[in-house]
Image (cartoon, coloured by chain):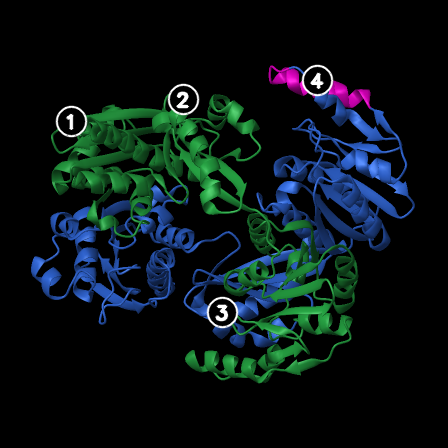
Chain colours: A green, B blue
Amino acid sequence: MIAEIICVGTELLLGDILNSNAQYLAQELATLGIAHYYQTVVGDNPERIKQVLAIATQRSQILIFTGGLGPTPDDLTVATIADYFNTPLMERPEIIEDITKKFAHRGRTMTASNRKQALIPQGASILPNPIGSAPGIIWQPVPNVTIMTFPGVPTEMKLMWQETAVPYMQNQGWCGETIYSRTLKFWGIAESALAEKVAPLLEMKNPTVAPYANFGEVKLRISARAKSQELADKLILPVEQKIRDIAGIDCYGINDDSIASVVGKLLLDAGETLTVAESCTAGGLGSMLTSTPGSSQYFYGGVIAYENIVKISLLDVSQEDLATEGAVSHAVAKQMASAVVKKLRSNWGISITGIAGPGGGTEFKPVGLVYIGIAKITGEVESFEYRFGALRSRDWIRRVSACTALDLLRRKLYLSAGRLQ
Amino acid sequence: MIAEIICVGTELLLGDILNSNAQYLAQELATLGIAHYYQTVVGDNPERIKQVLAIATQRSQILIFTGGLGPTPDDLTVATIADYFNTPLMERPEIIEDITKKFAHRGRTMTASNRKQALIPQGASILPNPIGSAPGIIWQPVPNVTIMTFPGVPTEMKLMWQETAVPYMQNQGWCGETIYSRTLKFWGIAESALAEKVAPLLEMKNPTVAPYANFGEVKLRISARAKSQELADKLILPVEQKIRDIAGIDCYGINDDSIASVVGKLLLDAGETLTVAESCTAGGLGSMLTSTPGSSQYFYGGVIAYENIVKISLLDVSQEDLATEGAVSHAVAKQMASAVVKKLRSNWGISITGIAGPGGGTEFKPVGLVYIGIAKITGEVESFEYRFGALRSRDWIRRVSACTALDLLRRKLYLSAGRLQ
């Protein structure tokens, strides 16, 4: 069985939206082991949708449509498909009932335009939409062609795909070997350096190992084609172990881990707490740490010391050092980290002070110069200098500074946990 | 002239990458006034690329290919196109020379596989690639069909498009009237409510007015088709004025404005300064404010009071109120805002305390309950309660809380500036 993705919507032809639905469905088809050779985008135009149907029914057996299921006059995917196959539309009372209920729940009443969404080709099954008003269809209008329709709204499409379409296709026996993946995540090593270290593994066929990099983070995705998760694990886990042996502490986690969530887990395990003093990141580090639910168990908060007045008032940074060394210096980074630990009585304190640009750089202190301080409640304090380069964007420098600070703490926590074992 | 976008790459069929090239080219074609009715994605497979060519040459006159121009064996776009039109490939010495130079510049030597990139169909023109090794082609193999090829790498494709393809198409007289747009941005009004208020404008044809909404923000894009910016402005500006008259203060800016940048401008105009005390957003508000370069002119920083210990130590919040009213309350929001203003001597102080979820909600204080405090250095302080709903994600609640807080200050600054006039 060969599938084809057909996305309907003039907004796609105008470039108003990015076609993320096609990527999602492509990933899903690859995972399910269903071949797919073409994707088509077409506007909300009946004649052109029919031309696409004429082509797709010749070369594919599963036609997956997204878009054009709404209540407005330009939503005409289902009516056009029915017309192409000379099949009348029937109003389905269960859809009317479902839409009425959903509207009542939101305190609204159904409008006449929504009635259109209850029209389904005779003989088609309803593909239920648990959260929106537009249902899809699953329909075999002619032998060897199955049509499924989904709304263009990604959240609705994904839920309908997972809850109904995937089980349906599995029951039909259309799915082959499935692709199972596991992503290893790295910080503190360049993509090219990591790729060189694991070069022979990148040549493998099953599992495959593919590198990705973004915002200073490097990933290796190990993907195995297998009949079950268990069989896939037998292929993936030995390769993962090899990579971990090669990469050591540079590998910080897998799949949905973030450096912040890994640091959180290490702090939780150690029963320790953290505070922050942020200058150039101005809250970005705190925001990153608290994007993990439950982070209040190990993160207290801290100080956004963006301007010197805050460094002086709340962190007792020496005015003399600010004048002689400057706010972006080892001395100030150390004082910021020490002060936040002392004032808030956490086990660890992290400070960041740097020049995020685009302005504010000088010959000796260029844009991208960042100092990170790490202090312990026991009084020890260290600082680290980074030169991220003046060509990086403000956003990049701030984000990578926060991750680098967390990674410094991760390595310390990891090593001290190791010493305890 | 009708254009068609054809993206070649098995990585697109596997969903490994998002097809942002198609969106870019679609936006560009819309702006240039060149119609385009279909987009196709096909893998690196000669037979299927030829099938796509057979279809596209029947319905379109400008075929825009991206992908498959690299040096590896699976890059076969140009060879397949040449083969389809029974045209031999010729090695072009100027390309060999160009690639050799580029490689020398990077301290590398050209490999045999790169020689392939110098093969161009007989009669085709080179579409130069200023930054990469893969050139494209511009070729009219048969009357009424022009083919342009671009690499899949977005930076290279975009540069080649802008530097060569656009001027070429303009010289050929293929471009119609251009679309010029202006986006108005709104906060504090729902998309449906705004759409109702401006309903007659949404029916216009030139300019068109289209609503968008995301993360609590609503936008209206006014797009005019015209021969010049000046003529477009004549169509757009009266409609913009009508919308501004209808929306009033709910319209906060245009195009690249963010609420944070608009608040920054208002503070700068008033010569006033701001500090923050953040609980549930934990730095997100500070990070938002400082994403605008130059924000140190009006933003000092503040306190990340995520845990009560910080609220007590750095903001002198009453332990009794924390026990009786709870951290998420009018009383605590007011104290946080007042304290940060007093301690850091800024004109304005904003506080946010709330339950971002997914855990931590109760019957009376559900997830999504957020209090925002606004204090002035003169001693006035107010607090505002929001119930964003327990179904929203942690990320949504935190982001919308920060924007709502900034919007509250924006309205105050806007009104006080108005009073001064």
Residue at 55%, 30% (x, y): give it. A204
Label 1: chain letter: A
Mark 2–mark 4 Cα distance, whole angstroms, equals: 35 Å
Q: Does the magenta segment cover residue B104?
A: yes
Mark 2–mark 3 Cα distance, whole angstroms, equals: 49 Å
Q: Is residue A200 above or below residue A277?
A: above
**Is label 3 or label 1 in front?**
1
- Residues indicated by labels 2 and 4 sit on the same polypeptide chain: no
Q: Which residue is mark 4?
A: B100
Quarter location, residue B131? top right
* Position of residue A103 in the picture relative to residue A313 (left or right): right
| Residue that lies at the very extreme toward the right in this rendered image | B143
Labelled disc at residue B191: 3
Image marks 1 and 2: residues in contact by CB distance under 8 Å = no
Q: Which residue is mark 1?
A: A380
- Residues indicated by labels 3 and 1 sit on the same polypeptide chain: no
Q: Main secondary structure of the magenta part?
A: helix
Mark 4–mark 3 Cα distance, whole angstroms, equals: 55 Å
**Span of residues in magenta:** B92-108
Q: Amino acid at mark 3?
A: Glu
Label 3: chain letter: B
Label 4: chain letter: B
